[in-house]
Amino acid sequence: MYARLMTDMEDYQSRGINPKCVEDWENSRRSPCAKDCWESWDFDATLDDGAVLSLRVATKDGASIHSSKDAPVIRLSLVRGDGTLMQASRSFAAADCTWDEQELDIHCDDCELSGTLRGIHLVANALEVQGASAPAQAEEAEAESAETAETSKIAAESTTISLNLDFTALTRPVRPATGILDMGHDGKHMLGWVCPMPLARVEGTVVIGGESHAIAGTSRHSHAWGTVTPSRAINDWFVVSQDFGERMVMLLDATSSLRSGFIRFPMIFVMNKRGNLMYSNTLDSACTAETDDWYDDLETGAAFPCAVAYSFDTPDGVSLRYELHGEGPLSAPEVHPCGSGAWGLTKFSCTDARFRAAGTLSITSPDASGVASETQGAGDDDDSYDGADLHLRTALWTGETCFACGLVGKTFNVEHSPQIATEYVFEN
């Protein structure tokens, strides 16, 4: 059993990674075109009109991960403000795609993804809608005739979606140490993750069935890659970002598979309103995670956490707690194949879901640190006792967000001890 976050200086040097900052080339293609190798660029946005958009550009679709050749795909999930779900995708021939390895510059036929850590331009044309579902309604909606339902289905299947979007970073990029999990002893079987844009402003147009809509909102952009099938390396993952105005939080919690001992890697980053990193967890931090409520999906048999809380205690006396209370998923959980076996039968799969949630961030620190001094305090300035617990200040922020989670194993593993390793602590 083996899994570790690569944090040694030789890990940085052997891969040309700058330990002090994320560089533009880290958002370019980093996986080879080979068996079990894959890569994706993900964009999740909450739009000003209440819609939620999720888009992925990938070197392979899930069923082709075991192939030695690329099978590029762009996938879109759009939950509109009224609850209507639209899903669309477009596959490409590998010969029609180019991937730069020095900068983010991807071209798939007439689609494009290019830019820097400060701004990204995305064009995705003619994505074919696979299905559209209306929002849940009262009992009278269930009386819709079969003929009307079939007409709606045909209309959805004949619709295409095109996007022309610009993403402008509002914070600096983050990654945990090198951003690479070594899932073997030789450093060849790896999973990589970096978040070039923990928080960004997205603006542009979406064209649905020939009708153009201007959109704007806030988004997160993350970039993941690997040289091992995710379903063989990861048991579960959880990701969320939230903007509180004064503070912004980015959290990724990944657990390795059974074969590597269910080792947990909870990674949290806190940034101030200028986009500068204030805190990330380190080897010296103590992390605990609690799961209070679950969503059991009868269709897939998967159980997802709805209410979770993460607590981090640092050596200098600062306590950070981030709580999320979600409701039902934005849309039905999806099962994605992760490679196919003989005769095309799926051997491995990942089930994922996205939830709206109420988030609360609290940071408690001694008076001297000044970390929580900007907001309302929870303490008694007039108390004359010298106990350390009487000289703390707590800053508290609340708001709405969305989180996503994925499950490869039978359930989320919440009992194991975390392994934590990132490098920056309260750098302004």
Image (spheres, rainbow, N blue to C red):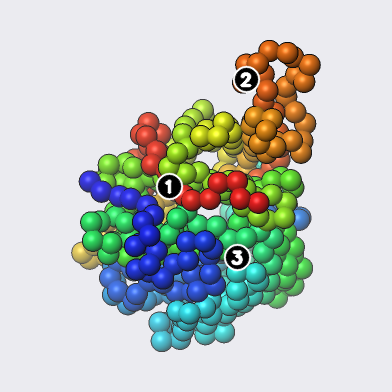
Q: Earlier in the sequence, mark 1 or mark 3?
A: 3
Circle number at residue 421: 1
Q: Nearer the viewer, mark 1 or mark 2?
A: 2
Question: Residue 34 location in percent, x, y?
Answer: 30, 74
Of residues 352 and 4, the one nearer the viewer is: 4
**Residue type, label 1:** Ala
As drawn, the label of residue 389 is 2
For marks 3 and 2 on the same chain, the one whose residue lies earlier in the sequence: 3
What percent of the width, then of the height, locates residue 140?
69, 41
Q: In this picture, is 371 found above or below 36?
A: above
Disc number for residue 156: 3
| Residue at 60 percent of width and 65 percent of height | 156
Q: For the residues labelled 1 and 2, say whether their Cβ atoms are less than 8 Å apart.
A: no
Find the distance from the CA under tag 3 to the CA under tag 2: 59 Å
Question: At 43% from the left edge and 42% from the top edge, which residue is drawn?
Answer: 283
The Cα–Cα distance between marks 1 and 3, rounded to whole angstroms, is: 46 Å
Residue at figure coordinates x 50%, y 43% from the top left: 281
- For this view, does 331 lie left or right of residue 395? left
Residue 330's spot in the image, x, y percent?
59, 47
Residue 155 in the figure: left or right of residue 182 = right
- Mark 3 burial class by Cα count in 10 Å: few <14, some 14-19, many 20+: many
In this rendering, which labeled residue sits more in front, label 3 or label 2? 2
Q: Earlier in the sequence, mark 1 or mark 2?
A: 2
Residue drawn at point x = 38 percent, y = 42 percent: 419
Seen in the image, is 124 located left or right of residue 371?
left
The residue carrying pointer 1 sits among few (fewer than 14), some (14 to 19) or many (20 or more) residues within 10 Å by Cα, namely many
Kind of element beneath mark 1? loop
Q: Secondary structure at mark 3?
A: helix
Closer to the camera in the image, 42 or 391 = 391
Packing grade of label 2 (10 A; few <14, some 14-19, many >=20) is few
Identity, as a three-letter code, of the amino acid under mark 3: Ala
* Name of the residue lying farthest toward the left: 342
